[in-house]
Image (tube, rainbow, N blue to C red):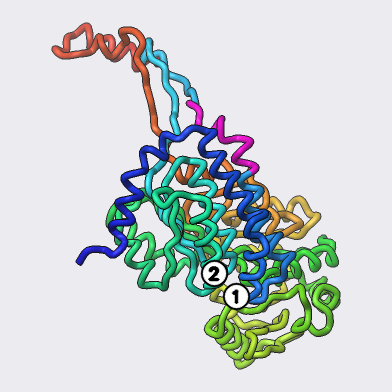
Amino acid sequence: MENRFQNLFNTLKNNRYQVANSTYKDRITKLLTLKKAIEVTYRQDIRDALFKDFGKPQLEVDLTEIYPIISEIKHAKKHLKFWMGKQPVNTPLSLLGASSYVQHESKGLCLIMAPWNFPLNLLFCPLVSAIAAGNVVVLKPSEMTHHISKVMKTLVEHVFLPNEVVVIEGDVTVAQELLKLPFDHIFFTGSPQVGKLVMKAASQHLTSVTLELGGKSPSIVDASANVKDAVNKTVFGKFLNAGQTCIAPDYVLVHNSIKTRFIEAFKTTVTEFYSTAPESSTSYCRIVNEKHFNRLLNHLEDAKSKGAQIEFGGEYNQENCFLSPTLVTDLPENASLFNEEIFGPILPVIGFDSIEEAVAIIQAKEKPLALYIFSKNRKHIDFIMKNTSAGGTCINHNLAHFLNNNLPFGGVNFSGLGKTHGVYGFEAFSNKRAVLKQHTKGTIDLLYPPYTGFKEKLVKWTVKWF
């Protein structure tokens, strides 16, 4: 049975070399047209759609959805000419008479699959990298946020030709059918569980993948930390997008000497940020759908049934999928909140007595997408950095590393494969083509058969000196 997307696939594939041969100016023109469409033409449509999908505040849309894409485009405009150029490398004397360089070439036809939590950002930021690298692209947004999906489809059709970039909407069956096609690269953002399925499908065609996944990203607050500052940043990082963020602090390890102060400061800060009635706050969004809302309630019920305490929050309204900022303590190790990525506005606080104890908790879990450290103690910071592994780390902040296009963004092992943003995103969608150019007769030309004693001596001399 022929794949229903085969004709579309072929149309894009037939145009891949024309796009690959586009100039720096051609690619920047496309990116600036995309920038204008997002920043001006469709800006209010984007805001309205995301509010309809899960009550996202307008300022939060600008900060977390629109700004990162605009920043990515500006960064590409500044650096793309250099990225596209030949990158000279040294040639050993054993290859006398030759020069060498690396040329970044487009991978070809790419599939970008985005999740629902930041549907615009996580679809279009990789698209910027793919366009900068000279690819044709199929975009697959999440079906869970259908209002913004429709806006993105209209926007893409406004900016790009149908043989350059297309949006394909649909549920999991659409995604499965797309994954059967032999794309040149797949860029997937989502859960580790689905990431495994994507990687398995890609392996059938030996397609390269970038997997931006997740996991349980920890935050450590030691006794030397500025408690109020750590709390303010943690509350902002955790409850942005109602905790539906892959790099949100999933749980906080707090030194027992400051644990009570941390909890009290947490309560104060949540009230300052979202008032005493967060459901009425215009700065706090909703859970994306009833399925995820019920999943979070089940986590809370499981925790309470095993002896955990709801120190703060826990209020909810099923009609509009509202769950208030919630703090949980006394969480046992067998609770689901302790073992599964939370992806919602529930924050477990776990006490520790030594930095070694805190690190042991982190080491016992899969490598996280992000790890956060709040400390003024250089020895503690160094110990944590040397004895843990994570996709990215902020020291005395959280989430902020995502906004620096000069830093690679991505996970490690369970939390992801490959990096994105800036030059790292450009490289993800490029093949580093090795090129050696021979200018004059070289050493290798002297080693053609038949192999003689002289040639054997020449090889030994070459190996000895070069």
Secondary element type, mark 2: loop
Q: Amino acid at mark 1?
A: Asp
Quadrant for the N terminus in the image: bottom left
Establish if 390 lies above or below 107. below
- Structural crowding at the residue carrying mark 2, measured as other residues with C-alpha within 10 Å and reported as few (<14), some (14–19) or many (≥20): many
Q: Is residue 234 visible?
A: yes
Check contact, mark 1 vs mark 2: CB within 8 A: yes
Rounded to the nearest whole Å, what is the CA distance between mark 1 and mark 2? 9 Å
Q: Residue 419, percent across and down?
A: 52, 49
| Magenta residues, start to end | 74-86
In the displayed orientation, state which residue is furthest to the bottom: 305
Q: Residues within 10 Å of mark 1 (few under 14, many from 20)?
A: many
* Residue 214 x %, y %: 54, 64
Task: From the viewer's perspective, tell me whether residue 285 is left or right of residue 26.
Answer: right
Viewer-proximal residue among 277 and 361? 277
Q: Amino acid at mark 2?
A: Trp
Q: Give the residue pinned by disc 1.
A: 53
Whether residue 80 appears in magenta in the rendering, the answer is yes
Q: Residue beneath label 2, please?
A: 116
Q: What residue is at 45 percent from the left and 45 percent from the top? A: 429
User: Circle 1 sits in a helix, a strand or a loop, which is it?
Assistant: helix
Q: Quadrant of residue 313?
A: bottom right
